[in-house]
C-alpha cells in the first residue's frame, strides 16, 4: 500500500513539473515571437538606412550647392523659402519614416500616413 501511495505522489510531482515546463515553454515562445518581430522591423529599418546612405553618397556636395543656389535665387526674388526643418521632415517622410506626432520616427510599413500627410497640408 505504501508503494502505491509513493508511486501516486511521484506521478503527481512529475505532472506538476511537466505543467511548469509547459508554462515556461509558452512564455519562451512569446519572447521568441517578440524578438522575431523586432528583428524584422530592424532589418527593414537597416535596409532603409542603407538606401539612404547610398543615395547620400551619390548625391554629394553638388546637390547641397545646388540647393543653396536655389534658395539664394528665391530669396533674391522675394519668394518665401520653406525652412530647412520642413525640408528635413519631408525628406524623412519620403525615406519611409513617420513625421507625425503620433508615430514620429517609426518606420512606415503600410504606405502613407494620414497624420503625416496632414502636416504637409498645413
Image (cartoon, rainbow, N blue to C red):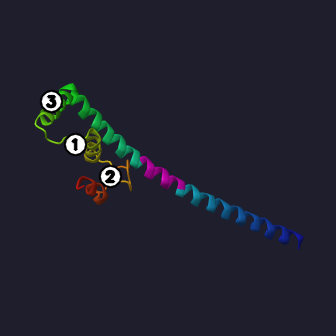
Dominant secondary-structure state across the stretch colored magenta: helix
Q: Earlier in the sequence, mark 1 or mark 3?
A: 3
Q: Earlier in the sequence, mark 2 or mark 3?
A: 3
Quadrant into which the N terminus falls: bottom right
What residue is pinned by disc 3? Answer: 69
Mark 2–mark 3 contact, CB under 8 Å? no
Residue 108 image label: 2
Seen in the picture, residue 15 relative to 89 is either above or below; the reply is below
On-image quarter of the C terminus: bottom left
Q: CA distance from mark 2 to mark 1?
A: 24 Å
| Picture coordinates of residue 74, whole percent (x, y) | 13, 36
Looking at the image, which residue is at 28% across and 54% down?
Answer: 119
Closer mark to the observer between disc 2 and disc 1: 1
Residue at x 37%, y 54% (from the top left corner): 101
Q: Residue at x 22, y 27 (%)?
A: 60
Look at mark 1 in the image and give the residue it sits on: 82
SS assignment at label 3: helix
Span highlighted in magenta in the image:
31-39
Image x and y of residue 72, in percent: 16, 31
Report the label total: 3
Tell me whether circle 1 and circle 3 mark residues in contact (CB < 8 Å).
no
Residue 32: say if magenta: yes
Q: Is residue 61 above or below residue 5?
A: above
Q: Quadrant of residue 50?
A: top left
Q: CA distance from mark 2 to mark 3?
A: 32 Å
Outermost front residue: 78
Q: Circle 2 sits in a helix, a strand or a loop, which is it?
A: loop
Give how far across and how far down residue 98 sits, in percent.
33, 51
What residue appears at the point 21 percent right and 29 percent down from the top-left corner?
Answer: 64
Amino acid at each position: 500500500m505504501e508503494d502505491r501511495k509513493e508511486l501516486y505522489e511521484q506521478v503527481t510531482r512529475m505532472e506538476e513539473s511537466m505543467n511548469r515546463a509547459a508554462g515556461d515553454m509558452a512564455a519562451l515562445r512569446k519572447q521568441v515571437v517578440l524578438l522575431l518581430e523586432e528583428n524584422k522591423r530592424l532589418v527593414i529599418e537597416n535596409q532603409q538606412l542603407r538606401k539612404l546612405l547610398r543615395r547620400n553618397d551619390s548625391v554629394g556636395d553638388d546637390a547641397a550647392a545646388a540647393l543653396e543656389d536655389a534658395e539664394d535665387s528665391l530669396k533674391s526674388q522675394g519668394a518665401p523659402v520653406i525652412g530647412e526643418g520642413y525640408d528635413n521632415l519631408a525628406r524623412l517622410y519620403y525615406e519611409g519614416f513617420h513625421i507625425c506626432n503620433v508615430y514620429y520616427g517609426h518606420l512606415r510599413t503600410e504606405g502613407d500616413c494620414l497624420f503625416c500627410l496632414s502636416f504637409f497640408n498645413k
